[in-house]
Amino acid sequence: MIRSMTGFGSATGEVDGTRFVVEVRAVNGKFYKSTLRLPDDLQPLEAEIDQAVSRRLGRGSVTVAVRVAAAPGAAAAARVNAAVVAEYLRQLRDAVPPDMREQCRFDAAAVLALPGAVEGGSEDRVLEQGRGVLARLLEEACDRVIEMRRREGAALAAQLRGLAVEMAARLDRIERRAPEVVVAYRERLRQRVDALLAEVGAALRDEDLIREVAIYADRSDIAEEVIRLKGHLAQFEQVLSPADGRPAGRVLDFLSQEMLREANTIGSKSSDGEITREIVEVKGLIDRIKEQAQNVE
C-alpha cells in the first residue's frame, strides 16, 4: 500500500529525572529534507538523529524537535569532586608561606573552575542520557508517523484508483469512436466530391477515394497512443500496490507525465469533436492524478 508524505508522531521518555520529548512532523517534499530543533546540550547528536530519521522516512520535508526538562525534585546541579578540591586547597596552602596564610583568601569559583573539580555537569549528563534514550524515542515517533502515512495513503490510493477507472472508461469510448471517425470522413468526402464532379459531368473513382481516406486514416490514427495510455494505466495500478513497500511517489509522478504526453498526442491527431471532448476530460483527470501523486511518499 502506498503511503502519504504527511504525518506526525511523538514519544516521551524519562531517565534519572530528566524528561525527553521527541516530535517528528512530515509534510510533502520532492526529496528527503530534514530540519532539527535540538537543545544546545544535544547538538553533538545532530548527525546521529538525522541518520536515524532518514532511514525510516525516505521522502518529504521532516522536522524533528527534541525537548528536555528536569522532572520536579530532580537534582540538576553538577557534582563537586571533594577529593580533587581538597587536593587543590592543600597544594595552594603549601605554596603560601606560613606567616602569610592567615591573610590569604581563596576564591571558591576559581577553585571550582580548575580541571576535575566539578564532574557530571548538566550538559554532559543530558548528552549521556540523550544518547541512550533518543534512539528509542525516535523509533517510536517514526513508527507513529509511518502509521499515519499509511492511513492517509490508503485514502489517496482509493482516490487515485477512482481517477484511473474514469480515465479507462473514457479511453474505451475514444477507442470505439476512432473507427467511426474514418467512416464518417469517407462519407463526407464522397458527398462533397460527388457534388463538385456532378457539375462537370464526371464521377469519382473508387481508388481515388480510397487513397484519400487512407491518407486521412494514417494521419489521424490514435490506436498506438491509446494502447500506450492503457498500458500506463495498468502499470499505475501495480504501483498503487507495491509488493516491496518501497516509496512510489516518484514513479507515479513519472507515469502521470507519460500519460499526459500520450493524451496530448491523441488530442493533436484527432479532429473529431467527440474525441476532443473526451481527451480534454482525460487530461483533466491526469492533472488531478499528478496533483495527488505529489502527496505520495
Image: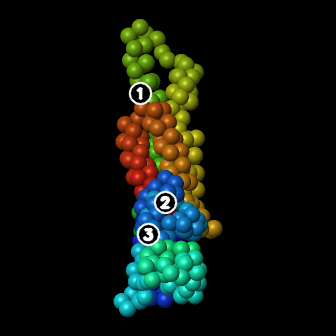
Amino acid type at image mark 3: Pro
Which residue in the protein does label 2 denote? 34
Give residue 218's mark. none
Give residue 39's mark. 3
Give 261 or 22, whichever is nearer the viewer. 22
The residue depicted at 53 percent of the width and 28 percent of the height is 219
- Residue at far top of view: 200
Residue 72 location in percent, x, y?
36, 89
Mark 1 burial class by Cα count in 10 Å: few <14, some 14-19, many 20+: few
Mark 3 burial class by Cα count in 10 Å: few <14, some 14-19, many 20+: few
Q: Earlier in the sequence, mark 2 or mark 3?
A: 2
Can residue 158 be seen in the rendering of this structure?
no
Q: Earlier in the sequence, mark 3 or mark 1?
A: 3
Residue 36 location in percent, x, y?
46, 63
The residue depicted at 55 percent of the width and 78 percent of the height is 97
- Residue at far bottom of view: 73
Callouts 2 and 3 close, C-beta under 8 Å: no
Amino acid type at image mark 1: Arg
Which residue in the protein does label 1 denote? 188
Q: Earlier in the sequence, mark 1 or mark 2?
A: 2
The residue depicted at 37 percent of the width and 37 percent of the height is 273
- Residue at far right of view: 244
Mark 2 burial class by Cα count in 10 Å: few <14, some 14-19, many 20+: some
Q: Quadrant of residue 76?
A: bottom left
Q: Quadrant of residue 48?
A: bottom right
Residue 129 location in percent, x, y?
53, 81
Using the numbered discs, state the Cα–Cα distance from disc 3 to disc 1 in whole angstroms: 79 Å
Give 183 or 281, whichever is nearer the viewer. 281
Callouts 1 and 2 close, C-beta under 8 Å: no
Amino acid type at image mark 2: Ser
